[in-house]
Amino acid sequence: MLESNSKANELTQIILCIVDEKSPQTVQELMDFVQEKGQWSNKEIIANIMKLQAESKIRLNGSSLPVSLRLVVFLGTNQALWYWATVAIAVISMVLAVFIREGFYPWVYLKIVFGLIFVLWLPGYTFLKVLFPVNKSINVLSTSLSNVEQIALSVIVSIALLALIGLILNFSPWGLNLTSIVLSLFTFSLVFATAGVVREYIFKREVQR
């Protein structure tokens, strides 16, 4: 593990030095320079370059890499931590709701806390992530919301969405019950969280151009 981290750090330093000294304009140019410096695979070089671009440490034009690969690298940066936190909260909440019964102390308290977050905050938060991509790293006017506005709107929108989902389930073949509500909110949160992180990635790319 330490050897792997050391190798990655060495590659990062080499890339930054090459960008500073030779000012390559495209990913391919930078890759050619890096390959002259050491024995790294194309996959390692590409992943490191895309990570540095996602963190706004370098900027290159004319990238011919697949968008899917660049998105995967973006998901591994700190800017996408909110997405993984959302997925973790949704999974934990669903597991607690399904398997923890009333009176099973002290886990029932954990179930209540995550349940409130899952119902009254997560749906609205992921929905707003699609509408308002956040871009805090660049000092430009954007459609981002402040933290206070986002929290308040998340609760309000979550209540509205819960009512709408409940109404739809009531007239669906599955009916309105705990299982259908939990699965519906879980699916809704994951779908909109994924759409939100993709839109945020696209938004950041457009601003950086």
Image (cartoon, helix red, strand yellow):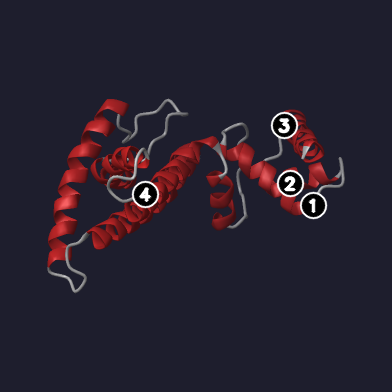
Quadrant of the drawing holding the N terminus: top right
Instruction: Residue under label 4, please give it.
Output: 96
Between 182 and 159, the one nearer to me in the picture: 182
Viewer-nearest of labels 4 and 3?
4
SS class, disc 2: helix
Residue at the disc numbered 3: 16
Instruction: Measuring from the top left, give residue 198's x and y in whole percent.
Output: 44, 50
Q: Residue at x 25, y 63 (%)?
A: 180
- Above or below: residue 151 compared with residue 157: above
Q: Is residue 32 left or right of residue 127?
A: right
Query: Which residue is nearer to you in this view: 108 or 54?
Result: 108
Q: Which residue has dot 2 on it?
A: 45
Amino acid under disc 2: Ile
Q: Are marks 1 and 2 in contact (CB under 8 Å)?
A: yes
Is the residue marked by circle 3 packed among few (<14), some (14-19), or many (20+) residues within 10 Å? Answer: some
- Of the two numbered discs 4 and 3 on the same chain, state the one appearing first in sequence: 3
Element marked by disc 4: helix
Residue 168 in the image, given as x and y percentages of width and height: 15, 63
Q: Earlier in the sequence, mark 4 or mark 2?
A: 2
**Residue shown at the point (62%, 41%) measured from the top left:** 51
For disc 1, the marked residue is 41
Alpha-carbon neighbours of circle 2 within 10 Å: few (<14), some, or many (≥20)? many
The residue type indicated by label 3 comes to Leu
* 196 vs 174: above or below: above
Pair 3/1: label in front? 1
